[in-house]
Amino acid sequence: MLERINNLGYAVESVEAASDFYRVSFGVEPGASETVEEQGIVARMFRVGDSMIELIEPTHPDSPVGRFLAKRGEGFHHVAFEVGDIEATLAELKKHGVELVDSEPKVGARGALTAFLHPKGAFGVLTELVELPDRGR
Amino acid sequence: MLERINNLGYAVESVEAASDFYRVSFGVEPGASETVEEQGIVARMFRVGDSMIELIEPTHPDSPVGRFLAKRGEGFHHVAFEVGDIEATLAELKKHGVELVDSEPKVGARGALTAFLHPKGAFGVLTELVELPDRGR
């Protein structure tokens, strides 16, 4: 049911500084910065194979990523796995009593459906499920 | 130069418990447990698309992963990126003053060459580089 690592999210103080690091050191080409006000983040992504690395900077300290940075410092924030049928996956997780942040999928960027498991429910790893649109369902 | 996410490492108290979680909740099939004495770990892997998730349990508390668990608890431990030429990548990183754990590649499992960047050198993310063997070089 886990088809692919869609993205890894890294929480950083500055997406510009982190983008420069990955561009200069590894020759990757991060995309444009994107501000997502409702999540309180500025994000920039770059591709590694079939997956993306998402650099995430909080727009203000009192946002989830701002609080994450204050508590844990820069580093890994989340992993997002692509699944074929997010509703079925969530139903399975609920059946097994897995702790979820989102019990129902939300509509995310470009029409993807997404839901987070609670890190407590996944051995300390903040885990996102993503069902991409246009899968012909 | 970053060709693929080879694996994500998760530090866990019990690879058996974590394997059961991923098998039952997501239908993945973790491989056999492998003990790597010189690293002080027991590891089990499962595939997600082109990448692997590596569940890592310390063999004793006074090992790098044991100390990691004592300090941070269970969760994301490292990401490993495949590169085409690890020597060239390390030379580039040194040129830019990036902090490294391994300034020269080590020979790892199945003849792969590996080297770790220090998390301080990569925005808090423990980052491993992997050059796979049999690339016809």
Image (cartoon, coloured by chain):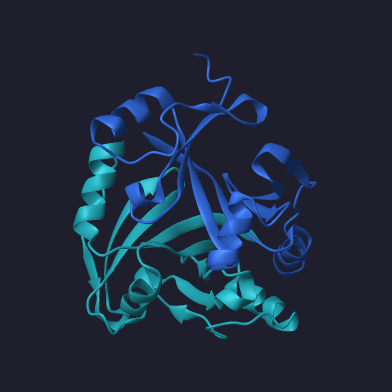
Chain colours: A blue, B cyan
- The percent coordinates of residue B61 (x first, y second) are 26, 80
Residue in view at x 47 percent, y 57 percent: B6
Q: Is residue A48 left or right of residue A83?
A: right
In the figure, residue B85 lies in which quadrant?
Answer: bottom right
Does B2 sit above or below residue A109? below
In the figure, residue B77 lies in which quadrant?
Answer: bottom left
Does A90 sit above or below residue B110? above
Residue B35 in view: yes
Does B68 sit above or below residue B55? below
Q: Quick one: A54 or A135, which is closer to the camera?
A: A54
Residue in view at x 36 percent, y 29 percent: A89
In the figure, residue A12 lies in which quadrant?
Answer: bottom right
- The percent coordinates of residue B104 (x first, y second) are 55, 85
Q: In this view, does A58 lie to the left or right of A134?
A: right
Residue in view at x 37 percent, y 47 percent: B47
Looking at the figure, which quarter contains the N terminus of chain A?
top left
Q: Find the residue positioned furthest to the front.
A: A62
Q: In this view, does A76 lie to the left or right of B18?
A: right
Does A6 sit above or below residue B99? above
Q: Is residue A104 left or right of residue A43?
A: left
